[in-house]
Image: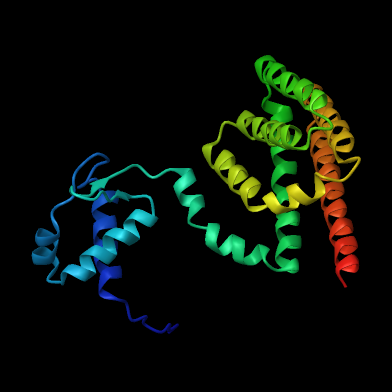
């Protein structure tokens, strides 16, 4: 008979799970105000701190909105709220070189797949949007701040083509988490021209609805960005030694 240790749970975790169950089962709907702290205390036979900690846990999960001066209410969870929960762990991983390499690899896999799907799903309107962004991208070469902002916009537009809020939420989080890489690699003398040329190749493949070529172009682009980042890091480390 397979056995597993029974985990001792804190009281507020049990309270949070019971309220989450009520939400999942539809007993509490998005927009509904939750019972008061006193009512929860009486219903579950727990103290005020357990209820408050449970509310904070549910808030972090994106299930409950807690406002000062009024009762908490149920909210519909969003992809952004779910991904935001990972931010602390992501930044901790990125503080380490191995963590940075792992994120670069994950980004390449993720955005390569996005480019492949975008090649299949892109409509004439999507292509027109990408072409307009790419034109501004070209005009911003030499203006680091403007170019980086439009660079982010181009990649986000690709994620939008997939029409999946989880994709756009994850992509937006990865952009934020890898902001230091973008700031370092983007300041290289030829970074703007190289990124623009890569974007052109990606767009051409998507316009041709060639998923394999779009994925390859994206992966090559991100590999070049990562390589440039590590070259600059190595140079800076040598100078600082």
**Which residue lies at the image location 63% right of the left edge and 28% below the top edge?**
161
- Of 210 and 131, nearer the camera is 131
Question: Left or right: where does residue 103 sit relative to residue 11?
Answer: right
Return the x and y of residue 90 as percentages of the image width and height: 60, 60
The percent coordinates of residue 54 (x first, y second) are: 28, 63
Give whichever of 178, 142 is nearer the camera. Answer: 142
Q: Residue visible at 48% across and 44% down?
A: 79
Q: Quadrant of residue 116?
A: top right
Task: Determine the residue positioned at 21% across, 46% down.
Answer: 28
How far from the left and from the top, in percent, is residue 182? 74, 47
Q: Quadrant of the C terminus?
A: bottom right
Q: Is residue 69 above or below residue 156?
A: below
Is 120 left or right of 231, judged from the image as shown?
A: left
Determine whether 25 is above or below 9 in the image: above
Give the quarter of the figure containing the N terminus. bottom left
Picture mark count: 0
Q: Position of residue 93 (x, y in %)?
A: 64, 66
Q: Quadrant of residue 156?
A: top right
Please give the name of the residue rendered at 87% of the width and 51% of the height, measured from the top-left corner: 228
> Is residue 108 visible in this depiction of the protein?
no
Residue 33 shows in this picture: yes
């Amino acid at each position: 008979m397979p056995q597993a240790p029974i985990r001792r749970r804190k009281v507020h975790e049990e309270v949070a799970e019971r309220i989450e169950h009520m939400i999942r089962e539809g007993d509490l709907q998005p927009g509904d105000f939750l019972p008061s702290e006193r009512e929860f205390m009486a219903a579950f036979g727990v103290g005020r701190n357990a209820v408050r900690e449970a509310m904070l846990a549910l808030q972090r999960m994106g299930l409950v909105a807690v406002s000062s001066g009024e009762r908490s209410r149920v909210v519909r969870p969003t992809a952004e709220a779910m991904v935001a929960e990972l931010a602390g762990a992501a930044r901790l991983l990125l503080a380490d070189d191995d963590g940075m390499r792992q994120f670069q690899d994950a980004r390449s896999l993720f955005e390569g797949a996005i480019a492949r799907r975008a090649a299949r799903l892109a409509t004439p309107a999507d292509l027109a949007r990408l072409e307009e962004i790419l034109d501004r991208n070209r005009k911003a070469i030499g203006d680091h701040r403007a170019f980086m902002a439009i660079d982010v916009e181009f990649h986000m537009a690709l994620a939008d083509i997939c029409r999946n809020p989880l994709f756009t939420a994850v992509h937006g989080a990865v952009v934020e988490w890898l902001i230091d890489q973008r700031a370092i690699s983007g300041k290289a003398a030829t970074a703007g021209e190289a990124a623009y040329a890569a974007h052109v190749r990606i767009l051409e493949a998507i316009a041709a609805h060639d998923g394999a070529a779009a994925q390859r172009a994206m992966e090559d682009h991100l590999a070049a960005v990562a390589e440039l980042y590590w070259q600059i890091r190595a140079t800076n480390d040598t100078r600082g030694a």
